[in-house]
């Protein structure tokens, strides 16, 4: 989905350890509710904010999560919310695999994998819960941008992700 948008930046939180997930999740939920998302939708957006913060901390040594309200460029009406997480870590590598459930730290997890740290489901969950997900490799690091729009028929359509 493409929109002619302008932004209202609301928060940038430096994520250094896993406690920062809670800060990001609670801010995302509060802002999502203030944008008119339902409490279920706001909770889903909060989970995604926590996941992006978690990835920045666990896989990139930290990062910054930016929360922005998306507004229609002409009317100024709020049309959605953006989570943008920037880090200067080693990079995501194989993005297609990273988006698949069960892929974590460079391999597809087996049930008896004793080295597993996560489920490998975080990015896939962000993709399912948000309307847009863009992963941009940088010369050093990664930028992950996820957007949720106030009305997105695609999300409710039969066969949606
Ligand atoms: N910001 C990042 N920088 C570098 N690699 C990343 C980043 N985010 C994700 N990855 C890579 O993509 C993989 C998949 O990420 P994903 O969030 O789906 O799973 P996970 O973090 O391993 O586990 P889970 O999120 O279920 O706890 C990660 O294991 C990691 O290898
Ligand atoms: Mg993760």
Image: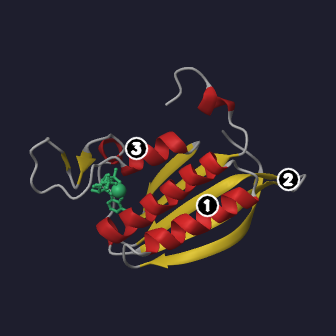
What is the C-alpha distance between the residues marked 3 and 1? 20 Å
Q: Quadrant of residue 18?
A: bottom left
Q: Is residue 86 above or below residue 39?
A: below
Which part of the image, by quadrant, shows the N terminus?
top right
Q: Give me the residue at 62% from left, 29% from top.
A: 156
Q: Position of residue 76 (x, y in %)?
A: 87, 56
Q: Earlier in the sequence, mark 3 or mark 2?
A: 2
Q: Give me the residue at 57% from left, 53% from top.
A: 43
Q: Position of residue 154 (x, y in %)?
A: 63, 30
- Respond yes or no on whether mark 2 lies under 8 Å from ligand 1: no
Tell whether 72 sits left or right of 115.
Answer: right
Read off the residue under disc 2.
Answer: 77
Tell whether 159 sits left or right of 152.
Answer: left
Seen as rendered, the residue at the extreme right is: 75
Q: Is residue 111 above or below residue 53?
A: above
What is the C-alpha distance between the residues marked 3 and 2? 29 Å
Read off the residue under disc 3.
Answer: 124
- Respond yes or no on whether mark 3 lies under 8 Å from ligand 1: yes
| Residue 129 can be seen in this image | yes
Q: Earlier in the sequence, mark 1 or mark 2?
A: 1
Question: Nearest the camera: 109 or 84?
Answer: 109
Q: Is residue 159 above or below residue 65?
A: above
Question: Nearest the camera: 144 or 121?
Answer: 121
Q: Earlier in the sequence, mark 3 or mark 1?
A: 1
Seen as rendered, the residue at the extreme top is: 158
Q: Quadrant of residue 109?
A: top left
């Amino acid at each position: 989905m493409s929109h002619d948008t302008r932004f209202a930046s609301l928060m940038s939180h430096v994520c250094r350890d896993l406690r920062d997930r809670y800060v990001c999740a609670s801010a995302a939920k509060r802002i999502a509710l203030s944008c008119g998302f339902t409490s279920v939708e706001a909770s889903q957006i909060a989970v995604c904010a926590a996941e992006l913060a978690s990835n920045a901390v666990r896989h990139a040594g930290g990062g910054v999560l930016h929360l922005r309200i998306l507004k229609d460029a002409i009317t100024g009406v709020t049309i959605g919310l953006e989570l943008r997480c920037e880090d200067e870590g080693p990079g995501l590598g194989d993005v297609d695999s990273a988006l698949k459930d069960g892929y974590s730290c460079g391999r597809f997890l087996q049930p008896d994998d004793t080295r597993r740290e996560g489920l490998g489901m975080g990015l896939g969950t962000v993709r399912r819960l948000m309307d847009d997900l863009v992963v941009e490799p940088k010369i050093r690091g990664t930028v992950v941008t996820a957007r949720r729009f106030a009305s997105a028929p695609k999300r409710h359509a039969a066969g949606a992700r």
